[in-house]
Amino acid sequence: MKKYAFLLLFLLTACASSKPDMSNMSAEELYNQGYDELQQTSWSQAAASFEKVELDHPYSKWATKAKLMGAYAYYKGEKYDDAILSLDRFIRYHPGNKDIAYAYYMKGLCYYDQIVGAEKDQEVTAKAEEAFKQVITRFPNSEYAKDAKAKMVLIRDHLAGQEMEVGRYYLSQKNYLSALNRFSTVVEKYQTTPQIEEALYREVEIYTILGLNKEAKMSLRVLGHNYPQSKWYQMAEKLQK
């Protein structure tokens, strides 16, 4: 038993001693080590190697690349805050770099991958929306703009869903004006989302409760014109009878 324990200790010592000494590595060697660690899915180790390129060789061409690769390593390791900090540094100091569109896009991904259900706070969703807007606006012809637009569909659906959740809560508390503000936000800002039909119905419902028949008929007209087969239109019609 002691023989095997000694052999295990020897192997562990040998592995530890074989780890390269990062203190004397060139920028290129550190960068390549980080890249190798990425290939091995050692995200934290890769991020540390890329960070060391920046610290030890800040003026080398490898430091610029390392900022972006370090951000990618943090992103893959789901350390989104660290990734965003690295991306912000890259965007600030290298606005003319050929990979700048990718940096903006990856920042959007960091927020996008943290999106939660519409019943929860959507602060991170709003940040994802803003980041992808930057991609679409600044780099409309880039390979990332198309995917950013596709992801915006889910983002806007979540933001509209949050407005509906809050609106329904206010409605249940008979706080009609606050509820109306939420539903009207969906009608004005999120017309292409699935929530639009219910939002228009809720406008009819609240206007009817408040005795604002002119406004109720206007929302009913919009709902019927755009969604004549909708169950929400049928329900809204009954409110006006």
Image (cartoon, helix red, strand yellow):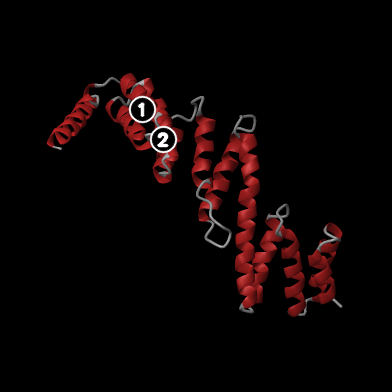
- The picture quadrant where one finds residue 193 is bottom right
The numbered mark at residue 34 is: 1
Identify the amino acid type marked 1.
Gly
Q: Is residue 180 above or below residue 94?
A: below
Farthest residue, direction front: 1
Q: Quadrant of the N terminus?
A: top left
Number of numbered tags placed on the structure image: 2
* 26 lies left or right of 219: left
Q: Is residue 126 above or below residue 167?
A: above
Q: Are marks 2 and 1 in contact (CB under 8 Å)?
A: yes
Q: CA distance from mark 2 to mark 1?
A: 9 Å
Task: Please report the residue visible at 64 percent of the width from the left and 65 percent of the height from the top.
Answer: 182
Secondary structure at numbered mark 1:
helix
The numbered mark at residue 73 is: 2
Q: Residue 237 at x, y = what percent?
A: 85, 71
Task: Please report the residue visible at 83 percent of the width from the left and 57 percent of the height from the top.
Answer: 226
Secondary structure at numbered mark 2:
helix
- The picture quadrant where one finds residue 168 is bottom right
How many other residues sit within 10 Å of disc 2, few (<14), some (14-19) or many (≥20)?
many
